[in-house]
Image: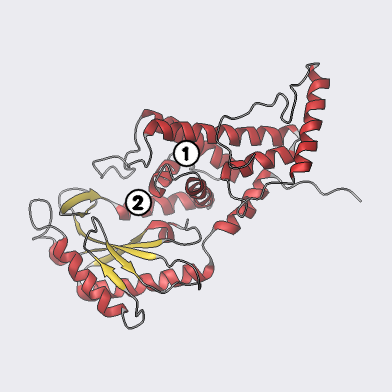
């Protein structure tokens, strides 16, 4: 009986996705709670419109889900609120009172906070979807239309800031459609990589950079490789600008920019090495490099290390026969090594 082939890198990524994507129960409950908040906001601010953004709206939520995002564009505030006029504090407080009144019957441990919140009303439900897990929260933006330019004014307490979250969601959904869902799937993988590697970027920066390089149907592997190259090159030039060309400041990084670029280039080299090893006929070595990239045994387990060592020995023998060179001593031979702090030896 023939020995079954080792799973391809593409197949490994597809399997990994199923382990990190938000569960149906979480997603259903997140949408239900989002609608409860939206109904409370529409009642408090008649004639206003509610928009959705963030990972649930964008189709790239991870498990465990950490938050849901929505906003209300308040029609009645158009003339009296905005830069040079009233700040957002009273609108945020009204929204908080309305949400509290509408949801506290169902969620006895509900807390709705505005104090210390710079941009959004913070809603804590106090009712996890799964027992023993941390519950997700909701961030609620009280916005007004910008009468003189594209986008909205959103809170930046005690005043306002320009943004265009509605355009951001439209751009993401268009990218998902244009790439036949590859954009959302790769973004989910990249967000998990970011989460497992110290969060050098915020999630929106991951997505904004992906808008510039994942623009057509392609394999998950090709999309990841394209993103690491593009993201490193773009951030080497400067911080990411708002893809909707509305926000005045670029997207803020969580690490110094030079350190982010270095981390992206190291990750890209590791992924390129995995791709090259698979192409050369060393699937276990390729699998091992891919697993090291994500640093998460539950999401993408490393292969049996004895089998990896055996395949590395075969690679060294074949390289020696092909080139006549004498490999260096020890596992890895002449295969280039990436200088990173590995999560496992």
Q: Residue furthest top?
A: 324
Q: CA distance from mark 2 to mark 1?
A: 16 Å
The answer to which image quadrant residue 124 occupies is: bottom left
User: Could you tell me which residue is drawn at 75 percent across and 36 percent down?
Assistant: 282
Please provide percent x and percent y for residue 160: 17, 52
Which SS class for mark 1?
loop
For residue 326, which numbered disc appears in the image? none
Residue farthest bottom in this picture: 105
Element under disc 2: helix
Q: Nearer the viewer, residue 73 or 170?
A: 73
> Does 154 appear above or below 75?
above
Q: Nearer the viewer, residue 154 or 332?
A: 332
Which residue in the structure is indicated by mark 1? 213
Please provide percent x and percent y for residue 177.
48, 53
Residue shown at 65%/46% (left/top)? 10
Given residues 135 and 166, the one toward you in this image is 135
**Which of the labelled discs sits on residue 168, or is there none?**
2
Crowdedness of circle 1 by 10 Å Cα count: few (<14), some, many (20+)? some
Q: Residue at x 57, y 29 (%)?
A: 339
x and y percentages locating residue 48 in the rendered image: 22, 68
Q: Along the horizontal axis of the image, is 207 left or right of 283?
A: left
State the scheme by which the image is colored. Answer: secondary structure
Note whether residue 46 is visible: no
């Amino acid at each position: 009986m023939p020995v079954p082939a080792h799973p391809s890198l593409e197949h490994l990524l597809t399997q990994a996705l199923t382990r990190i994507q938000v569960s149906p129960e979480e997603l259903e409950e997140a949408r239900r709670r989002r609608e409860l908040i939206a109904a409370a906001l529409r009642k408090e601010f008649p004639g206003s419109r509610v928009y959705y953004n963030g990972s649930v709206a964008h189709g790239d939520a991870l498990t465990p889900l950490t938050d849901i995002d929505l906003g209300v564009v308040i029609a009645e505030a158009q003339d009296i609120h905005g830069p040079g006029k009233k700040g957002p504090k009273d609108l945020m407080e009204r929204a908080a009172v309305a949400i509290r009144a509408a949801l506290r019957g169902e969620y006895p441990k509900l807390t709705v906070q505005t104090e210390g919140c710079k941009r959004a009303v913070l809603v804590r439900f106090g009712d996890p979807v799964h027992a023993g897990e941390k519950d997700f929260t909701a961030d609620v933006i009280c916005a007004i239309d910008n009468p003189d330019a594209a986008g909205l004014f959103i809170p930046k307490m005690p005043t306002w800031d320009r943004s265009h979250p509605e355009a951001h969601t439209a751009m993401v959904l268009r990218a998902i459609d244009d790439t036949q869902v590859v954009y959302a799937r790769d973004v989910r993988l990249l967000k998990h990589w970011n989460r497992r590697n110290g969060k050098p970027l915020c999630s929106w920066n991951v997505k904004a950079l992906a808008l510039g390089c994942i623009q057509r149907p392609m394999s998950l592997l090709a999309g990841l490789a394209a993103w690491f190259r593009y993201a490193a090159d773009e951030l080497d030039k400067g911080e990411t600008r708002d893809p909707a060309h509305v926000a005045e400041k670029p997207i803020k990084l969580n690490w110094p920019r030079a350190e982010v670029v270095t981390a992206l280039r190291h990750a890209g080299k590791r992924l390129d090495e995995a791709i090259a090893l698979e192409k050369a006929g060393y699937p276990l070595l390729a699998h091992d490099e891919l697993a090291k990239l994500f640093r998460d045994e539950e999401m993408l387990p490393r292969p049996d290390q004895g089998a990896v060592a055996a395949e590395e020995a075969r690679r060294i023998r074949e390289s020696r026969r092909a080139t006549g060179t004498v490999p260096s001593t020890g596992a890895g031979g002449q295969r280039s090594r990436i200088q990173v702090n590995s999560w496992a030896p």
